[in-house]
Image (cartoon, grey):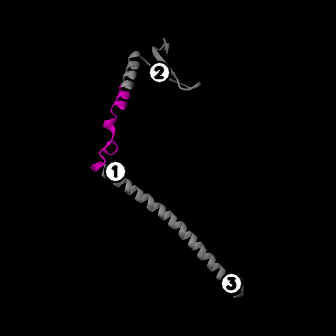
Amino acid sequence: MNTNKNEGSVMIVTPLKSDLFVSIRVHSWSRLRSLIVYTVVGALLAFASAPSRACTACFGQSDSALARGMNMGIFALLLVITSVLCGVAGFFVYVARRTAHLEEASRRLPNNLSQH
């Protein structure tokens, strides 16, 4: 930890890789303490409350209204995706049939149209 006496600030240098450093400039010790306290409290809240953050579908009540609604939403999205993919496949089938029909029609035409 380097202390710059001219500005009264504290610089924290943390090595991430061999040649890459991240520096955080904190202008007073009270801000440094606040940063540490908020980081610790945030980490505790993030890791200690895992059961309270889980929904009922993920945490065990798979027969609740929330789980049924989520399943219906998943099925609705699958229906939309399937219909779009079928539409794209149908378009390519249409193009292939139309191309085959035009090729057959061009074979039936006489070779030289200027004679008629």
The spot of residue 82 in percent (x, y) is 44, 60
Which comes sooner in the sequence, label 2 or label 1?
Answer: 2
Mark 1 crowdedness (10 Å alpha carbons): few <14, some 14-19, many ≥20: few
- Residue 113 vs residue 18, the one in the foreground: 18
Label of residue 25 in the image: 2
Query: Is 57 on the left-hand or right-hand side of 13?
Result: left
- Residue 108 vs residue 67, the one in the foreground: 67
Image quadrant in which the C terminus is located: bottom right
* Name of the residue lying farthest toward the bottom: 116
Label 3: which secondary element: loop
In 3D space, how far apart are the residues under numbered discs 3 and 1 (Cα atoms)?
62 Å
Magenta segment main secondary structure = helix
Magenta residues span 41-66
Q: Does the magenta stretch include residue 97?
A: no
Which comes sooner in the sequence, label 3 or label 2?
Answer: 2
Mark 2 crowdedness (10 Å alpha carbons): few <14, some 14-19, many ≥20: few
Label of residue 70 in the image: 1
- Residue 96 vs residue 64, the one in the foreground: 64
The spot of residue 15 in percent (x, y) is 53, 23
Which residue does the image show at 54% across and 66% down from the upper left? 92
Query: Is 7 on the left-hand or right-hand side of 40?
Result: right
* Location of residue 84 with respect to 45 vertically, above or below: below
Q: What residue type is labelled 2?
A: Arg
Residue 51 figure quarter = top left
Residue 41 figure quarter = top left
The spot of residue 74 in percent (x, y) is 38, 53
Label of residue 110 in the image: 3
Q: Does the magenta stretch include residue 57?
A: yes
